[in-house]
């Protein structure tokens, strides 16, 4: 019954002659959280980046809200306002304060009213306990704090889907939990649709509804989260979980 | 008449004379670069040593060359050598001296920077293998530094080549000086000769420097 | 060392000094403007104009100022473009410096990391917004060391103006040496003249470099 928001069909991605993604197909329902798991180099980041138009793909389709995305820069610019992405290295703009980082895209790209966005930004910053840092520069923040701001920066665009690429991977262990909590709440309270890539099985287990297991650029299985961690369908996924000490 | 100015280049032995002049510029540049790199390497290594006095002296030496234009350096050598030190060298030698000292100064800074950016772990693992300080420099640090400093060194070389254009100021028979003589001698016959002679010299410098700067740029792109 | 000689030469050096400073200033400002324009044309890959910009940058950077000046001052009059030595000097310096500055800015733009550009793109920025809000602010900060080096280089290059008899510092000294056959005093004054210009400039640039770097990246 729930609305399908994103659909990927027979997607193939090449780097030069080398194929990084093989015939990827899956779909994502509104409010669903999908975890993409798999060994290093399996193409997880590549897949996420492709879904945000940061990589071009050779053939296959990405369908957003029932409409096929034309692979043109213009179309992707529009889509990216609805599909946000947060990166492992936060990548806040170092020359702008926290607030300026957050306001930039909503006011300049989406041309929304500054005062309104600012109010919203404060509200979002409060939610992640960062409101007191609105006028601080990224360099004065810890990694975990910067990542929270990066999440807020994406949320301020009011995206319908958020892509999260190993957002806890560069953080100290004590920071990880806080970021995971934020993602968990986004799912539970806001029913945000998300795709997350992580090497932390606990994180995936806590927040994901579905798991997409990738290996060597191929989907090995797509399984409901609970089941993936208890009884994965494929041997490779089993092996992977054993290797991850899970 | 006007359009035939290009013939000035090929009348008599003009073209050959220009090439001879160019060769003078090239060997002065090449010799200065070689001598300068040798001295500069020594200075650069010394500047990473703990001795404060040596470091300070070499720093001042480098800064003096940073402050003074190469034209001024050339004239300092040109006047001070014969008049104060009573050394009478031909202009070409004086030019080599001035340029070598300048290259040494700039290169010492490049070497120092490169040596200091070789990771500490490399030094320590070298020492841990029982290398002496000298061996550490020769086999570990200098080869690694060399790779880091190559683009800057090539760029320095292009600047030396361009700077040979000021040789004419101390009457060295370089390509520009020869060019001027040709222009003056042919002024009546080829009034537009000046255009072609300077045009050709412009082109000479470009084909000497352009490949070098492309090389430096591609090395830099690789390092990124 | 003869102090009366130094005293008598002071006014002439004063003029030369002022001219060197003035020509440097005009040359540097002009170079920055030309450099910004050329690097923007290259950055946006404007058809034809960007190729022209690239050709210009390579020509300017790979030929000596001296021959550029000879062209302007001695060769151009033959085809009817006559100009004063000062005009030729300024045009030559800006021609040269514009190429160096463009190269510096382009290097800065290219130094902006892919991940910064990605995060701008992921926020839905178009090419121009990306340039305006991400690449240029960070790129100009990154190009500060090159800009500083170019400023120092251009000031020193004004000494080449002596070949077209512009009475700047170097020319003043050479004239006096030629007239009175005293070199030590006049050379000393020449060296001091450049030191007075260069030392504050170098200190100022170091300070500025640190400040811009800190403002943009915080280290
Ligand atoms: N720009 C690129 N050019 C060429 N090959 C690339 C490029 N980016 C990634 N690859 C290759 O594509 C494959 C998948 O890379 P990707 O970054 O998507 O893996 P990943 O699953 O995210 O790995 P990790 O868990 O280590 O982040 C790897 O083999 C990688 O070497
Ligand atoms: Mg990855």
Image: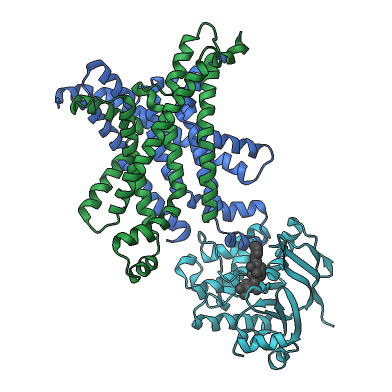
Chain colours: A cyan, B green, C blue
How far from the left and from the top, in percent, is residue C24? Answer: 40, 33
Q: Residue at x 56, y 71 (%)?
A: A149
Occupied quadrant, residue B78: top left
* The image quarter in which residue A91 lies: bottom right
Lateral position of residue C153 relative to residue A63, left or right: left
Residue placed furthest toward the top: B188
Position of residue C133 relative to residue A146, above or below, is above
Where is residue B67 shown, x and y percent of the image?
32, 39
Instruction: Compare residues C70 and B212 and report the one nearer the observer.
Output: B212
Would residue A164 be seen by someone viewing this image from the given angle? Answer: no
Residue drawn at 23 percent across, 47 percent down: B57
Residue C188 falls in which quadrant of the image? top left
Depicted A189 relative to depicted C61: above or below: below
| Ligand 1 positioned in quadrant | bottom right
Instruction: State left or right for residue B83 relative to residue A162.
Output: left
Location of the N terminus of chain B (image quadrant): top right
Q: Determine whether C66 is above or below B2 in the image.
A: below
Give coordinates of residue C92: x percent, y percent.
48, 28
The residue located at (46%, 29%) in the rendering is C65
């Amino acid at each position: 019954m729930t609305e399908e928001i994103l659909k990927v069909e027979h997607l193939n991605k090449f780097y030069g002659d080398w194929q990084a993604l093989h015939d990827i197909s899956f779909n994502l329902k509104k409010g669903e959280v999908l975890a993409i798991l798999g060994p290093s180099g399996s193409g997880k980041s590549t897949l996420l980046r492709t879904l945000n138009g940061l990589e071009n793909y050779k053939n296959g389709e990405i369908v957003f809200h029932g409409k096929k995305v034309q692979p043109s820069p213009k179309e992707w610019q529009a889509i990216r306002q609805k599909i946000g992405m947060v990166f492992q290295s936060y990548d806040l703009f170092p020359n702008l304060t926290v607030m300026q980082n957050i306001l930039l895209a909503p006011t300049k790209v989406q041309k929304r009213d500054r005062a309104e966005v600012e109010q919203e930004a404060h509200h979002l910053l409060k939610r992640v306990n960062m409101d007191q840092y609105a006028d601080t520069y990224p360099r004065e923040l810890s990694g975990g704090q910067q990542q929270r701001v990066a999440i807020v920066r994406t949320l301020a665009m009011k995206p319908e889907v958020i892509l999260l690429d190993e957002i806890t991977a560069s953080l100290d262990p004590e920071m990880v939990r806080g970021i995971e909590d934020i993602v968990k709440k986004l799912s539970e309270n806001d029913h945000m649709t998300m795709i997350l890539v992580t090497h932390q099985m606990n994180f995936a287990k806590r927040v994901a509804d579905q798991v997409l297991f990738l290996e060597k650029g191929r989907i090995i299985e797509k399984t409901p989260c609970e089941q993936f961690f208890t009884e994965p369908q494929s041997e490779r996924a089993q092996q992977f979980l054993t290797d991850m000490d899970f | 008449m006007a359009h035939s100015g290009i013939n000035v280049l090929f009348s008599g032995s003009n073209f050959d004379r220009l090439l001879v002049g160019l060769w003078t510029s090239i060997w002065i540049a090449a010799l200065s670069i070689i001598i300068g790199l040798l001295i500069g390497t020594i200075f650069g290594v010394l500047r990473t040593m703990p001795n404060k006095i040596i470091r300070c002296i070499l720093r001042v030496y480098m800064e003096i060359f940073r402050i003074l234009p190469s034209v001024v350096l050339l004239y300092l050598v040109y006047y001070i050598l014969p008049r104060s030190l009573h050394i009478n060298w031909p202009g070409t030698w004086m030019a080599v001296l001035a340029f070598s000292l300048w290259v040494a100064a700039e290169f010492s800074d490049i070497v120092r920077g490169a040596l200091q950016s070789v990771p500490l772990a490399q030094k320590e693992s070298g020492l841990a293998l029982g290398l002496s300080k000298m061996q550490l420099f020769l086999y570990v640090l200098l080869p690694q530094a060399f790779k880091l400093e190559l683009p800057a060194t090539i760029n320095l070389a292009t600047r030396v080549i361009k700077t040979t254009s000021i040789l004419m100021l101390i009457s060295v028979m370089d390509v520009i000086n020869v060019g001027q003589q040709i222009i003056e001698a042919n002024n009546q016959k080829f009034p537009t000769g000046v255009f072609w002679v300077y045009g050709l010299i412009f082109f000479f410098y470009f084909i000497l420097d352009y490949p070098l700067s492309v090389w430096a740029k591609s090395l830099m792109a690789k390092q990124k | 060392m003869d102090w009366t000689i130094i005293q008598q030469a002071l006014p002439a050096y004063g003029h030369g000094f002022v001219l060197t400073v003035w020509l440097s200033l005009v040359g540097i400002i002009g170079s920055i403007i030309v450099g910004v324009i050329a690097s923007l044309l290259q950055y946006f890959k404007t058809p034809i104009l960007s190729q022209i910009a690239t050709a210009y940058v390579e020509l300017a950077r790979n030929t000596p100022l001296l021959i550029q000046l000879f062209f302007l001052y001695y060769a151009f009059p033959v085809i009817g473009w006559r100009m004063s030595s000062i005009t030729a000097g300024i045009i030559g310096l800006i021609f040269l410096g514009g190429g160096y500055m463009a190269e510096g800015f382009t290097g800065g733009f290219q130094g902006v990391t892919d991940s910064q550009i990605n995060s701008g793109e992921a926020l839905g920025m178009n090419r121009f917004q990306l340039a305006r809000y991400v690449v240029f602010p960070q790129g100009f900060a990154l190009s500060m060391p090159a800009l500083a080096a170019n400023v120092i280089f251009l000031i020193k290059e004004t000494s080449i103006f002596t070949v077209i008899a512009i009475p700047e510092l170097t020319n003043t000294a050479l004239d006096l040496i030629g007239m009175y056959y005293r070199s030590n005093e006049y050379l000393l004054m020449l060296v001091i003249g450049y030191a007075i210009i260069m030392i504050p400039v170098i200190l100022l640039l170091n300070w500025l470099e640190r400040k811009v770097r800190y403002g943009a990246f915080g280290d």
